[in-house]
Image: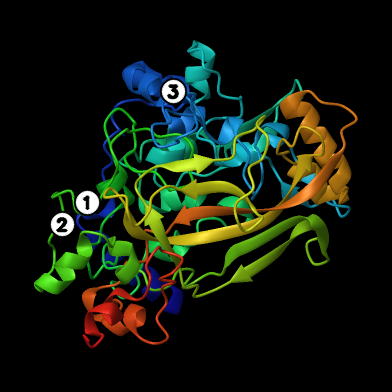
Amino acid sequence: MRRTLVLLAVVSIASAVPVDAAKKKYSHEEYFEHYEGTKTCLTCHEDEAVTFFHSQHYQWTGETPAIVNADGEKLGKKNTINDFCTNPIPAWIGITKNSRGEILSQGCSKCHAGLGKMPSPELSREQLENIDCLICHASGYNRNLYENEDGSLEWKPILWKNQAGLDSVSKRIGNPKRTSCLRCHSGSGGGPNYKRGDIEYELADTDRSYDVHMGTDGGDMACTDCHGGENHRMQGRGVDLMGSDSPERLRCDNGVCHDSEPHAKELINRHSARVDCTVCHIPTFAKADATDMIRDWSTPAYNEAKDKHVATITMAKDVVPEIGWYNGTVWAQLPGVPITTQSDGVVGMVIPQGSLTDPESKLFAFKVHRGRMPVLTEDRWLLPINVEEFFADGDIDGAVREAAHVLYGLEDIDYEWVDVKRYMGIYHGVQPAETALRCLDCHGPDGRLDWAGLGYETDPLAAVLAPSH
């Protein structure tokens, strides 16, 4: 009797729910019956696919108006070297397992918006069908790496054998949500928030005390509200990113959201002329998850719990940004070019350009990532590392030599290790006015700015307040 009463109650509740509320409508559910891969999208959206093919998100290279030493060459992840996972080409796709048979990694293509083929500069039908539209545009979509009958590897929807489920997910089409962007932009570099420092999974659902723009009780903004452009050309670039989708620099004070005098107090507005919003409104970064601050590839470590070999990584949380001048351009250490050592004896991977005397420069907040990387002993070229191979066997020497062969075609190399540093812009985790920095945080006796390093003789406020003689 009790089972019958429960069943009747459930039926009554279900019948009371309006039909329209019981089933959410999706924009594409009437446009096709079965999803058969990217060719289904191309039926209506081939022009959009072509624009995406030419974008930095697909090519992993782009125009370089902000790189002062690029000489017009297109640059990006694909043809440069970084101090995190170094370069994606030697480790593009594969299933790397530990001694227990557990999957350690599946290659750098995991965060590429394609299905596994290396992006080619030449447009073809094969390349268009390699685009994974759903990874950005379908809510609830997920994928994994599978081996085809011919032994090739391909990223496929996890529902690829469940046509009804795949059809349902593939029709949930819309603009990219925060979770879509964070899947790669927060997870890059080996773990949550490892790489950028200010792009945390916390941004998926947060409040204004964490980020006044993206907090659901604040601006409730999506990533595309700032970064969305036309024809798959995204606006804005991190300080250390090589390629640009859009030549226009994304600024807070361009008049769209804020102008050049956003404050009620004139004294603070005078600061805005030479101090970027990030300096005062992002007092710390890595607030929820620790970030990678130093990655030493010369000193392998072993993670027993994961049975995985890794670099020696120094993590930190609630990090105070370093402040420096930036005019929108950078100098970058490029492959196949002898390394340049900075005044501190460290190789600068990416160095922002600007100074106190440059009227185009402002003070910006940076994460400064440090590391230790291999270079050719004679030619002094920076070398990448086949990190996927290293994860499994811990042979860092073999991983360096393999990557040198793949990227440069070199054999029997002699190399050594050098210290490197990279400046990375901090733009997310923006604090509301009530928790932004106050005057004495910079101008007090224990202020956070290195005035001499910035080109000042002394703290400008101290100079103003000094008694006259």
- First reached walking from the N terminus: tag 2 or tag 1: 1
Nearest the eye: 290 or 29: 290
In the displayed structure, does residue 119 sit left or right of residue 386? left
Nearest the eye: 139 or 68: 68
Q: Confirm whether residue 375 shows in the render.
A: yes
Q: Confirm whether residue 193 shows in the render.
A: no
Residue that badge 3 annotates = 53
- First reached walking from the N terminus: tag 3 or tag 1: 1
Q: Quadrant of residue 462?
A: bottom left
Q: Crowding near pointer 2: few (<14 within 10 Å), some, many (20+)?
A: few
Work out how far the residue at label 3 is from the one at label 2, CA to CA, in angstroms. Answer: 33 Å
Q: How is the structure coloured here?
A: rainbow
In the displayed structure, does residue 113 sit left or right of residue 84? left
Amino acid type shown at disc 3: Phe
Residue pictured at 33% horizontal, 23% vertical = 48
> Residue 340, labelled with which disc?
none
In the displayed structure, does residue 402 sit left or right of residue 266? right
Q: Closer to the camera: disc 2 or disc 1?
A: 2
Residue pictured at 50% horizontal, 11% vertical = 124
Q: Closer to the camera: disc 3 or disc 2?
A: 2
Q: Crowding near pointer 1: few (<14 within 10 Å), some, many (20+)?
A: few
Q: Quadrant of residue 94?
A: top right
| Name of the residue lying farthest toward the front | 469
Residue that badge 2 annotates = 258
Nearest the eye: 304 or 44: 304
Work out how far the residue at label 2 is from the one at label 1, CA to CA, in angstroms. Answer: 44 Å
Residue pictured at 35% horizontal, 72% vertical = 210
